[in-house]
Image: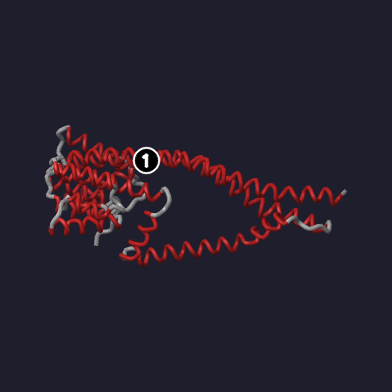
């Protein structure tokens, strides 16, 4: 059995660069073999190992998408899109699609990281400071004040009780995390687990809507690629089920295919899943079907949904940043009041 060359440093950014370079080399007129050899020669050590293993697999007789799948460093999306390109003779378009997809994905990650990095840094520093205050400083005041024969204020006693519970809380979090990881490892591929976990994700405030937009964007982009490559609708839906693995969407593709065979249009059957496909998207796909411009409509919707997703990511950052700062400020203020009250009372006791 072949062992994949698995390297975690082969990031989405590197994938985008590899697909972009391969597209440019192929468009310049170079053969596929020579283009791949140049990528291997000019890549970093990690990239050369991965691409070298893929190339050797291709030489041994496998198709490119099969070689990528067996390599272990490429996603179902990568393999599925490359498969579309190879089966339709439009590999350059598939490579360009992947380049654009990863460029957009990196841009969205940059937006989210930029929006959350400052509040998260503040949060981490605040947690460290508060932990030191709760575990070290407050108990010191407790001992001093106890020697003076006084009693700590209620708010300070509450903080001290919380500090005593920190080890218990840490153990409880560790146990819960272990149970979650164990359950995911044992049942992660089961239908019930996938259904339950995706339902939770889609119902999360703010994040649920972003997840739906992300997969709607993928759906529109991939359907446009398939339809424009003249692949039949039913075959396109079947291939989408192998590429988009997010449970509600992957299940819907199979059920929509069955319903289309039994009767009804694509848009009508899509409308049965309004929880994951927006009414606007369904309406525009219906228009595209009626005017025979489905590929153009999907392309436009992919651009619109991607733009909406990026806008909401920026808005999420604008909302979370002040909320995190406000929350941290309230907690810090609470701890400071709890600490300074004994100091004031200690001064009164000494007097």
Number of callouts in the render? Answer: 1
Residue 284 at x, y percent in the picture: 22, 42
Q: Is residue 259 left or right of residue 129?
A: left
27 to 65, vertically: above or below:
above
Q: Is residue 83 left or right of residue 100?
A: left
The quadrant in which the N terminus is found is: bottom left
Snapshot quadrant of residue 197? bottom left
Residue 262 at x, y percent in the picture: 13, 59
347 to 181, vertically: above or below:
above
Residue furthest to the right: 351
At x 65% / y 58%, what residue is drawn?
163
Secondary structure, mark 1, is: helix
At x 67% / y 50%, what residue is drawn?
133
Instruction: Tell which of 279 and 178 is nearer to you.
Output: 279
At x 26% / y 41%, what residue is drawn?
302
| Colour convention of the picture | secondary structure
Tell me if mark 1 has few (under 14), some (14-19) or many (20+) residues whose alpha carbon lies within 10 angstroms of its own.
Answer: some
Residue 247 at x, y percent in the picture: 30, 58
Instruction: Tell which of 82 and 245 is nearer to you.
Output: 245
Q: Can residue 92 be seen in this snapshot?
A: no
Q: Can residue 317 be seen in this snapshot?
A: yes
**Which residue carries the number 1 mark?**
108
Residue 216 at x, y percent in the picture: 28, 47
């Amino acid at each position: 059995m072949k062992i994949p060359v698995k390297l975690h440093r082969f990031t989405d950014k590197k994938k985008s660069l590899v697909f972009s370079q391969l597209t440019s080399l192929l468009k310049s007129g170079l053969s596929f073999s020579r283009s791949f050899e140049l990528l291997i020669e000019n890549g970093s050590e990690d990239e050369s190992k991965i691409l070298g293993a893929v190339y050797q697999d291709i030489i041994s007789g496998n198709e490119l998408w099969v070689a990528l799948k067996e390599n272990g460093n490429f996603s179902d999306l990568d393999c599925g899109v490359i498969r579309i390109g190879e089966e339709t003779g439009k590999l350059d378009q598939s490579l360009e699609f992947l380049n654009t997809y990863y460029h957009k994905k990196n841009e969205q990650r940059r937006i989210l990281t930029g929006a959350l990095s400052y509040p998260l840094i503040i949060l981490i520093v605040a947690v460290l400071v508060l932990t030191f205050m709760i575990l070290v400083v407050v108990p010191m005041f407790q001992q001093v004040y106890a020697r003076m024969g006084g009693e700590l204020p209620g708010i300070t006693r509450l903080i001290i009780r919380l500090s005593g519970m920190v080890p218990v809380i840490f153990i409880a979090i560790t146990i819960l995390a272990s149970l979650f990881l164990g359950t995911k490892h044992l049942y992660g591929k089961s239908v019930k687990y996938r259904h339950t976990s995706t339902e939770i994700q889609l119902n999360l405030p703010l994040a649920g809507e972003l997840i739906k937009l992300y997969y709607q964007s993928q759906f529109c982009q991939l359907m446009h690629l398939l339809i424009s490559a003249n692949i039949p609708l039913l075959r396109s839906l079947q291939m989408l089920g192998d590429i988009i693995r997010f449970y509600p969407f992957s299940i819907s593709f199979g059920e929509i295919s069955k319903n289309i065979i039994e009767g009804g249009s694509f848009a009508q059957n899509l409308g049965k899943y309004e929880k994951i496909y927006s009414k606007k998207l369904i309406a525009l796909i219906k228009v595209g079907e009626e005017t025979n411009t489905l590929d153009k409509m999907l392309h436009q919707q992919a651009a619109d949904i991607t733009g909406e997703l990026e806008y909401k990511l920026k808005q999420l950052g604008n909302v979370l940043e002040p909320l995190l700062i406000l929350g941290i400020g309230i907690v810090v203020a609470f701890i400071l009041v709890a600490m300074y009250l004994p100091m004031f009372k200690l001064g009164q006791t000494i007097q």
